Image (cartoon, rainbow, N blue to C red):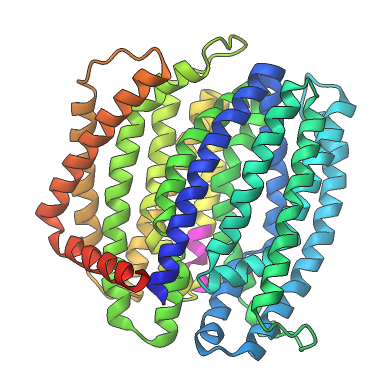
Amino acid sequence: MRSRKALYNIITSLLLEIIQIISGLIIPRLIIGTYGSNVNGLVSSITQFLGYIILLEAGVGGVVRAALYRPLAKKNYEQISRIIKAAENFFKIIGLSFLGYLVLLVFLFPFIIDGFDRAFTSSLVLIIGISTFFQYYFSITYQILLQADQKQYVTTIIIIITTIINTFMVVILINLGFGIHIVKLGSTIIFIIRPILLNIYVKHKYKINSKVLPDKTAINQRWDGLGHHIAYLLHNNTDITLLTLFTNTKEVSVYSVYYMIVSNIKKIIIIFSTGLEASFGNMIAQGEKEAINRNFNMIEFLIFSLSTILFTSTATLILPFISIYTNGITDTNYYRPLFAYFLILAEAIYCIRIPYNALVLAAGHYRQTRNGAFAEALINILLSLILVIFLGLEGVVIGTVVAMLFRTIQYAFYLSKNILKRNIYEFIRKVIIYLFTAVVIILINNMINVGVDSYINWIILSIIVTLNAFVITTIVGFIFFSNDIKNIVLLIKRMVKRNI
């Protein structure tokens, strides 16, 4: 059953990623071309500042998931209802806090951003904020439940539908000559559909009793989960926030365009770990120690391999793509090689630690690893704050790289000693092998001499580059990790047979 759910999650996540890549390429380019880099940067800044309200969640999402694994495995609907009730009560408070924060941001944000009329900025903050409020707080508890039950594909399907509708609507509104406010208001209306559909599905499929007493002990570790939550939030938000405060919206626009590309690569890798935490949680609940070690080794090998293939290819392809994508845009310089390479490195390090993070959280080891999470957040903020003053765009991403590297090493040591009980040499060995592999791939790919002046030529180059990376990484895999490859093949065969 776990394999079937994993297959559904991977397929729907892949489909969503394809759709989001297409949508992510279309919408920002239309906004930059129609309204300018300043407006695109303003929208990105507002979105990031609104994202900080998620701090109030205090890591409850992960804590609730960890609490749900055992009752879901035992089909104890009474306990499931009690946990959901406790989470809902907590998020009601968060919802009210968000509204207060939104009102505060509506009045203060125009003083943070220069170059726009205050009414223009305030109204845009309000419109984007309403969208964030409905998407996040009206369905978050049920999203957590579906993630814990390895049914994330349900949420994904709903997101796919609304993303497609939103993309078409944005294209139509912009081409009809409407302003950015009407465009974002249209998106807000579309995204309100998401929590409505999710609520309908969960109430139909699960025997949730809304009259039970909440199990407050289910969220006892929320303050321990806060560190993990802050670290994740700062990884996604710190850079744009500092650029907003210390540079200008054009620099934010440059960052957002590059991040759009690199984050899509990250999402592709994350797809293959979809439901990973829930799967590990189920194994832990069932006491399947051998399965945990076998599956972790497979996922670790898969993530290292995919990260090597995709991020080395991105290092070669990103600058030619940026040149084509921003052709004709002259209001700021989008060609930033050093920044691009540091951003790619930061996200590659983040992806490598995905299986480590998933297993730690599935085991509920929030308290034991919270200090590392707080340290990562502190490093990210302080180093980025210092470097942005001297180096600007490159400075903030260097701070992120150092913070990512620290936490990934900390996770590897903790996991080896306390959960998997294996020698840390296994992690170090993989890092050395794949680092060497990445250097070889980049050197070979940089020798390819293909003129890139159109999307067609870029696609041809991307096929050659990615194929080279795939072949080299696969050869390395067969030489050093043949046992993991055999286990992955066997797992795929079982998944296919169960679904025929």
Establish if 111 lies above or below 73. above
404 left or right of 416 in image: right
Quadrant (top left/top right/bottom left/bottom right) for the C terminus? bottom left
Q: What residue is drawn where x is 46% and y is 17%?
A: 324
| Towards the viewer: 34 or 96 | 34
Direction left: furthest residue: 479
| Towards the viewer: 26 or 379 | 26
368 left or right of 112 in image: left
* Quarter assignment of residue 42: top right
Residue 458 in the image: state x and y as whole percent: 36, 22
Q: What residue is drawn where x is 56% and y is 86%?
A: 71
Whether residue 420 is visible to the viewer of this picture, yes or no, is no
* Quarter assignment of residue 200: bottom right
Whether residue 100 is visible to the viewer of this picture, yes or no, is yes
**Residue 372 shown in magenta:** yes
Residue 150 in the image: state x and y as whole percent: 50, 70
Residue 441 in the image: state x and y as whole percent: 21, 34
**Residue 104 shown in magenta:** no
Q: What residue is drawn where x is 73% and y is 79%?
A: 85
Residue 101 in the image: state x and y as whole percent: 82, 50
Direction front: furthest residue: 500
119 left or right of 181 in image: right
* Quarter assignment of residue 7: bottom left
Dominant secondary structure of the residues highlighted in magenta in the image:
helix
State the extent of the magenta-drawn residues as a range: 366-373
| Towards the viewer: 480 or 365 | 480
Quadrant (top left/top right/bottom left/bottom right) for the N terminus? bottom left
Establish if 312 lies above or below 286. above
